[in-house]
Each structure stands twice: as structure tokens, then as C-alpha cells.
């Protein structure tokens, strides 16, 4: 018996074992083999599935990110980094889902803020109208940390409480969709802080957070974005 034949036979019996593990139903077998490609529905889609007219148009989103003034120095500039990551991730996920969504570059949002010193006193729908956006995402970061408490900075365990308001600009002053996302990274619980530099961990922390926020608004595969629980 040749080595090639032995490997082929093992592969066949392995496939049979999978089928018998699932059951004899071929539909169940197909579902098992393809479940990772089945998109998960967005909880707060930019355009509802029943709004076929708007779903055919390109949707423009403006992202405003802020953080609590009580955050530690380690998170200085985190709002800018997260805004840039969200602006990158949303179009990528939308493309996977065959949607046409663009995000206004953070530089344009910052330019708007500079030209309008009292922008915080304006309603978010006014921000969107000024920037030509269909939707505004207002993200606020609070209770952020990178280290596990009482670990003497020896264990990474990223945490944050993220509040998100989503405004439909065309509806004007209508109540926004709102949710709080209790964020943890990595999903395994913690990571030895001696294995990677703080800056690298912080970057991965914000990248993954951007993915999770984007997934609230766009249908996505379970494995979309950077690896889960990096």
C-alpha cells in the first residue's frame, strides 16, 4: 500500500466521521461546512433591509469619537486612532457584504470642528448635514484600561465601556439608535505584558474595538476583521 493511498483513505474516513458526527442529513452537513460564510445580521444597520430605495445608494457616514477626561495618559490620542480605524474598517466590511458605504475622512471631520468652535452645542444631525453625511456615529470611550488590576502592569487585560449613538441625518432631530458596548480584549482574558510592547497591544486593542463597533452596523461573517481575541 502506497503512502499516497494511505493518506487518501484517511481523508475519506475523516470526512465520513464528520458526516456521522453531524448526522445523516446532508443539509446539516452542508450547513456545518459553510456556517462560517453565513453573515450575521447587523443590530443597527445603516439602511434597514426593507428600505430598498436607500440600500441601492452609496451611504456616507461621519464618525465622531470622544473619550472621558478621566482616562489615563496611556490613552492620549486614542479617539483619533479609533476614528481612523473605524473609517478604515467600515468600508472593508461593507465591501465584503456588497454594500456601498464610505466614511468621511477623519481629517475632514477635524476640519469641521476647527471651523465650528461651538460644534458641541450643535445637534449631531447638523454635523452630518454640514459634512454631507447620511449617518453620524458618535462614539464615547470611558473606563478604559490596558492592564489587569493589581497585576503591577504585568498582565494585559484591555477593557472599555463604549457608548455609541447612531443618527439618521435625513430624519433630523429624531431619537438616535443607542447602545453601550462593554469591550474586553483579548477574549482569552489576559496576556503576559512581557511578550509584546505596550504600543503594539494598544494598537491591537483599538483595531479590534473598531471592528466590533463596525459589526453593529454591517452584516458580517463570524470571522470578519482581525482575528477574534488576538
Image: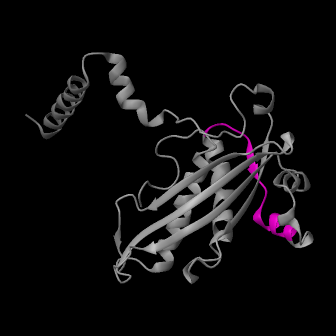
Write down the quadrant of residue 33 in the picture: top left
Up-down: is 143 above or below 127? below
Write down the quadrant of residue 25 in the picture: top left
Q: Where's the N terminus, which quadrant? A: top left
**Toward the viewer: 18 or 47?**
47
Expressed as whole percent of the image width and height from the top left, the position of residue 203 reads: 53, 70
Expressed as whole percent of the image width and height from the top left, the position of residue 161 reads: 54, 61
* Residue furthest top as drawn: 25
Residue at left offset 64%, top offset 40%? 44
Expressed as whole percent of the image width and height from the top left, the position of residue 169 reads: 83, 45
Residue at left offset 86%, top offset 64%? 121
Up-down: is 168 above or below 211? above
Name the image colouring: one colour
Q: Is residue 67 left or right of residue 201?
A: right
**Toward the viewer: 110 or 226?**
110
Q: Is residue 112 magenta?
A: yes
Up-down: is 192 above or below 182? below
Q: Is residue 10 left or right of residue 106?
A: left
* Residue furthest left as drawn: 1
Amino acid at each position: 500500500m502506497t503512502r499516497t493511498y494511505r493518506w487518501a483513505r484517511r481523508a475519506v474516513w475523516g470526512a465520513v466521521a464528520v458526516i456521522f458526527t453531524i448526522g445523516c442529513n446532508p443539509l446539516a452537513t452542508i450547513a456545518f461546512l459553510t456556517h462560517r460564510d453565513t453573515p450575521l445580521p447587523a443590530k443597527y444597520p445603516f439602511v434597514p433591509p426593507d428600505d430598498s430605495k436607500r440600500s441601492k445608494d452609496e451611504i456616507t457616514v461621519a464618525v465622531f469619537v470622544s473619550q472621558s477626561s478621566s482616562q489615563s495618559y496611556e490613552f492620549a490620542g486614542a479617539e483619533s486612532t479609533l476614528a481612523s480605524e473605524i473609517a478604515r474598517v467600515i468600508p472593508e466590511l461593507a465591501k465584503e457584504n456588497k454594500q456601498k458605504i464610505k466614511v468621511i475622512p477623519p481629517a475632514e471631520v477635524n476640519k469641521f470642528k476647527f471651523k465650528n468652535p461651538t460644534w458641541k452645542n450643535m445637534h449631531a444631525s447638523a454635523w452630518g448635514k454640514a459634512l454631507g453625511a447620511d449617518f453620524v456615529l458618535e462614539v464615547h470611550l470611558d473606563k478604559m484600561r490596558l492592564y489587569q488590576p493589581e497585576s503591577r502592569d504585568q498582565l494585559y487585560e484591555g477593557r472599555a465601556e463604549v457608548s455609541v449613538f447612531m443618527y439618521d441625518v435625513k430624519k433630523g432631530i429624531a431619537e438616535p439608535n443607542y447602545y453601550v458596548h462593554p469591550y474586553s480584549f483579548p477574549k482569552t482574558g489576559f496576556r503576559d505584558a512581557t511578550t509584546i510592547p505596550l504600543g503594539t497591544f494598544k494598537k491591537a486593542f483599538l483595531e479590534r474595538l473598531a471592528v466590533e463597533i463596525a459589526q453593529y452596523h454591517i452584516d458580517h461573517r463570524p470571522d470578519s476583521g482581525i482575528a477574534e481575541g488576538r
